[in-house]
Amino acid sequence: MLGNSLYEGLLTNLKNSFTYEFWVKPDILHPINKQSRKKPVNPDGQNYINGPGHVKYYDEAAVHVSVGKNGITVYEHTDINIYAVLVYEEVIKKEAHIAVIYDDGRPYLYMNGAFVKSGERSPKRNVYPAGIFGEQPGLYFEGDIKEIRLWDHCRSEKQLQTDRNKQLKGNEEGLFGSWTARRDVESEVISKKKSNRQNRTNKKNQDIEVSIIIPSFNKFPLNLFTLYSLENQTFNPAKMEVIFIDDASTDQTEEKLKNYHPPYQFNYIRNEKNLGRAKVRNVGIRSARGSLLIFLDAEMVTEPDFVEKHYRYHQSKNKMILSGVMHSKKIYTCIFPEFSQDVRDKITDLTTTNQEINRRLRDFQLPSENPYPLVEKNDITSLSYKDLVFKSFSWFQKITKNFDADLNGFMFPWMALLTGNVSIRKEFIEQAGMFDEDFIQYGYEDWELGYRLYKMGAKYLVRNDVTTYHQEHPVGQDKWKEAIHNLRLFINKHPDVDVLILGLELARIADLITISKVLKEYKLLLKSYPERFQGFQEKFIRILETIVLLLQIDIRHVNILGAAGIGSEGRIELQEDLLSIKNLDSFTNLASIMEKLMNT
């Protein structure tokens, strides 16, 4: 027997041309996906015989097969998505011999020795067969498997018809591997299946793959619209949970959501006192049962494929953090009493294309004490809420316009950890120590964690296809002093130039793109000339520390060098270093910013 050779996740010894043979009798129906190589599918609920295998590279795919009482589906699993590349609907009431043949990347399907259907050739360079799934074949297949064979070539129809009723010796030419059920193994598999069904019923925790963590403080009814949008996901609701942490809200949140019963698993947690942004998210992390965490703001409406795309991106990459906030759009779902007339006029213009929403708007009357909803649940489900989406500029756009999705060349990729819409493996965030609960007030608790993860090897990915819509609401009191306090805390924990230099942006001395260039050139200067510019390095760090101090005590940034304790002799030394740096021709941004600081 060659059975052991089938127990690998991905059989890379074979590629593009091979033959699977299965003798099976399925006990259940499986979902019928639409056959397409362009549109990925949600493969949850399938009745897999083998796989799925996971590939590492974008130009590869792994093959796995699902068989139900209503037909057969052949899937190709790429580095990100899964595609139903051959779908055949057929009633299967008794044991059937099924052959899936790949000929130079093109799939063909045979039943009981007869050809029934073919699919399009794979666009991938290499297509591999996936191995057996589980401890024994059929452990996760609802039905009976009599035999599995895998060949390293394309079997002909005549070979299939001749050999399908023959018992193999195990040394046939081209036979890569085979597995045949024995009675003791069949009994073991049946016993394990029954046990698995019971465990799935009694231990829902094991089914949860994605935990969505939503902290909320006085965001009703915006938070309800966010939850409605999560009801409309393409991802299997039985495999996702929403952990909703009500951080001592005083609005209608508790009254309306405490007994909320969506199709996904919903965990409502009520804090008796406000814990703040870091602690409340740690509550969510500790409560999460999924291996993948998605942090979502309470006022973010999601697209139907939001959860599925977050999940798919994480299947092929380790230590990845996927962020979508930088591509978020804005929307009005409510009229707040605090909205100005200009904002109400803008909402009126947006509703002209939707008669029903426009009618609701006309029914709104001032004075009003509470937010007035413009949308209802059916608007979220039908996606008609998008009529209220509008464009506006955000500082995020400076980053997304200048750098690719991997943020290559950007010196602050960890800024992508923005908890409005970001996902990360639970194990990874636990290894980093979760959110630092010393951050109590507004700001920087997410970037501080992002920076720690970055130093642990995190790779950040900023995508425009994990879309969310920020529901606009009145902005609270000025958070400037809280943000400056937390920046100081951030610097105390990480006294690195990568963090210190952020003061230049807050002091409006330079924008973020310029600061990224300055930091890149500064590090290159020290690497290229480790001994020559030690005095310059010391003064540069002292100037950055002074800028943050002036921000903290709210003093204008005038005579920064004097405030940094750099006297006339130090200025002369700095001027000489600056002249030398200019002559090197590779540090124009660094020289320019230093010149600007010297002239304040």
Image: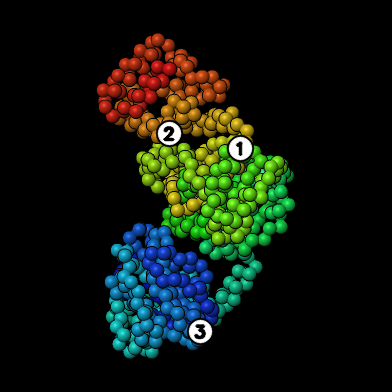
Q: What residue did someone put label 2 on? A: 512
Q: Please state which amino acid type lies under the numbered disc 3.
A: Arg
Where's the C terminus, which quadrant? top left
Q: CA distance from mark 3 to mark 1?
A: 76 Å
Residue 263 spot, x, y in % from top left:
62, 63
Q: CA distance from mark 1 to mark 2?
A: 31 Å
Q: What residue did someone put label 1 on? A: 340
Q: Please state which amino acid type lies under the numbered disc 1.
A: Ser
Task: Name the image quarter holding residue 195.
Answer: bottom right
User: For this rendering, which residue is in front, 182 or 533?
Assistant: 533
Say whether residue 586 is left or right of residue 443: left
Which residue lies at the image location 49% right of the left edge and 55% below the top edge? 310
Instruction: State whether residue 185 is above or below residue 558.
Output: below
| Residue 511 numbered mark, or none | none
Which residue lies at the image location 51% right of the left edge and 39% below the top edge? 447
Q: What residue did someone put label 3 on? A: 183
Residue 523 spot, x, y in % from top left:
36, 31
Q: Count residues near mark 2 (Cα–Cα under 10 Å), then give few for <14, some for 14-19, many for 20+.
A: many
User: For this rendering, which residue is in front, 526 or 62?
Assistant: 62
